[in-house]
Amino acid sequence: MTAAVPSYLSPTGQEIVFLLLGAVAVGSALLVVTTRQLVHAALWLVVSFGALAGCYLMLTAEFVAWVQVLIYVGAVVVLLLFGIMLTRAPIGRSADLDSGNRIVAAVVALATAGVLVAVVVDGFRTAYTPLEPGGGAAGELGASVFRTWVLPFEALSVLLLAALIGAIVLSRTDIKSDDAPPTVESGGQ
């Protein structure tokens, strides 16, 4: 006798919370790319990453959820905000952030979303995996990151360090090049 597959028409409370967190993640991700204020985009990114961490918690991957919060919310978004502040990017509304291709972008986004949803629904129509605690163990994840993926992990850290140093160099006003014309402050007329 085969085991009965749960129906999609009677979702459990866990599945409902997962869907709500997914809707929050997608909605805030849309706000990240549609807002005209750079700081607001970074804050909506925090909401999207937080909802994604909640999805990981619902999938019983607690370690991955906390890594999501610590690394992406705690480090990447803070680095983004520091980059905005150090480069003196415009904080308020900016017309430069609109390229005028909203309709084309919306059509491409909807077509891509439609293809992805169709492929996922067709591929996983009858797949069902019951959630059991302990799926996000730190031991297997740590072994994978520090044995198999150690070189890309270190390359990413060097890349982030180079981006931070570049933002600091770009924001410094006391560095002058030799080719620059003399200014009133440096004694030129």
Image (cartoon, rainbow, N blue to C red):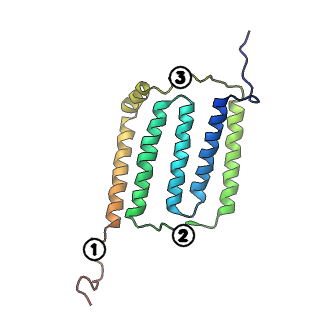
Q: Amino acid at mark 2?
A: Ser
Camera-side residue of 8 and 127: 8
Q: Amino acid at mark 3?
A: Pro
Label 3 belongs to which residue? 133
Helix, strand or loop under label 2? loop
Helix, strand or loop under label 3? loop
Percent coordinates x, y for residue 162 in the rendering: 34, 54
Earlier residue among tags 2 and 3: 2
Earlier residue among tags 1 and 3: 3
Compared with residue 57, is residue 131 higher up or lower down, i.e. above or below?
Answer: above
Which mark identifies residue 177?
1
Earlier residue among tags 2 and 1: 2
Percent coordinates x, y for residue 130 in the rendering: 62, 22
Helix, strand or loop under label 1? loop
**Who's the residue at 37% across and 29% down the image?**
147
Which numbered mark, 2 or 3, is in the foreground of this view? 3
Indicate the quadrant containing the N terminus: top left, top right, bottom left or bottom right: top right
Query: In the picture, residue 115 is in which quadrant?
Result: top right
Gap between marks 1 and 3, in whole Å? 59 Å
Camera-side residue of 114 and 95: 95
- Mark 1 Cα shell of 10 Å, populated few (<14), some (14-19), many (≥20): few
Percent coordinates x, y for residue 168 in the rendering: 33, 61
Q: Are marks 2 and 3 in contact (CB under 8 Å)?
A: no
Left or right side of 61 for 103: right
Camera-side residue of 185 and 153: 185
The residue lying furthest to the front in this view is 13
Left or right side of 174 for 140: right
Q: Amino acid at mark 1?
A: Ser
**Who's the residue at 67% across and 36% down the image?**
120
Label 2 belongs to which residue? 94
Q: Total number of numbered labels?
A: 3
